[in-house]
Amino acid sequence: MSKNDKHKTRWTVARRVVQIGMLVLFCLPLLAAGWGLLGQVSGGDAAVATPAEGVFYGSLSSSSVAGVTVLDPFAALQVIAASKSFDVAWLWGALPVLVVYGLIRGRAFCGWVCPVNLLCEAVDWLRAKLGLRVAERVLPRHAKIGVAAGVLVLSALVSVPVFELLSPISAINKGILFGSATGVLTLAAIVVAECAWGRRVWCRAVCPLGGFYEVLGRVGLVNVRIDHAKCVRCDACAHACLADPEILAPALAGDDVIVRAGDCMACGSCVDACPAGALKLGVGRPRAAGAQAKGNTCDAVGAEGKGGEVSA
Ligand code: SF4
Ligand code: SF4
């Protein structure tokens, strides 16, 4: 691989490190406890009780960091709806996650942390190796916001946080740790949908957690910036987009200087794919280019792009 090729995969490599690191982080304490139970690590029965006393343990829905509970805000909303009560501790638990993803990008969770996205990318890789093509359907990407609202209503009606029971996200951890049949079946359904129906159908249109983070993502500060003067209109970025090719359209058409849609995961796949170096991940939310004369767009990008560029 040439130096230039390495440059072209830097965001993908960085994401892979984070995705796998998060998977290990959430599985390791519980695996260690299981090994303790089986007498495979020192401590025996005593080791079984240690995860709750460790520096970190838990799941992507609820975890304990140095004794402080951290909650997924959407899980907290489901618990509030299901229990029809409110505990201020839930708010404090969810606040750090809300602030972090609110500042970065809501769906950065999907691109950098969620194990289902990692699974879908593995399916993409396998399909490419096997030379299999799958439909790039136009999917109703905002439908997942409706699914998220429906999950909250249903949680209130049945008094159970329903997505927490069925979530394929926790199913991956359960599958790895306990060989959970439900988890494996849920994941198999996603893979079948990926292959038989369309690319990223779960992530783009169905996942309620993605819907929640899409709403939060509308205020994120990490954005893809485009230099229209460099763009050669090859569409490689749209083909590489993990979220939805449609979200790049305003920027590619010259109507905006950043990818503004709440669906953007700040994954950097488009940046890596661009052969002309026209895209960068940057910090800040410059005004839409539509407010400026289209002919001046490139100058505006050049001026605004200097301050907040992120280098990998
Ligand atoms: S626009 Fe770029 S950074 Fe945003 S989701 Fe698509 S590929 Fe990732
Ligand atoms: S990949 Fe780069 S050059 Fe091609 S359309 Fe996208 S921004 Fe333009």
Image: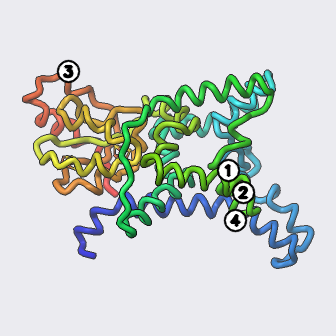
Q: CA distance from mark 3 to mark 2?
A: 49 Å
The mark found on residue 28 in the picture is 4
Quarter occupied by the C terminus:
bottom left
- Residues at marks 3 and 1 touching, judged by CB atoms closer than 8 Å: no
Count of labels in the image: 4
Q: Residues within 10 Å of mark 4 (few under 14, many from 20)?
A: some
Q: CA distance from mark 3 to mark 4?
A: 50 Å
Instruction: Check the image and name the residue furthest to the left.
Output: 295
Q: Residue at x 55, y 35 (%)?
A: 99
Residue 199, x across and y down, in percent: 42, 48
Q: CA distance from mark 4 to mark 2?
A: 12 Å
131 lies left or right of 17: left
Quarter occupied by the N terminus:
bottom left
Q: Amino acid at mark 3?
A: Ala
Q: CA distance from mark 1 to mark 4?
A: 14 Å
98 lies left or right of 295: right
Residue 311, x across and y down, in percent: 31, 54
Q: Residue at x 10, y 43 (%)?
A: 229
Foreground label between 4 and 2: 2
Q: Residue at x 44, y 66 (%)?
A: 126
Q: Which residue is mark 1?
A: 170
- Residues at marks 4 and 2 touching, judged by CB atoms closer than 8 Å: no
102 lies left or right of 284: right
Q: Amino acid at mark 1?
A: Ser
Q: Which residue is mark 3?
A: 291
Residue in the foreground of this view, choosing between 214 and 160: 160
Q: Earlier in the sequence, mark 3 or mark 1?
A: 1
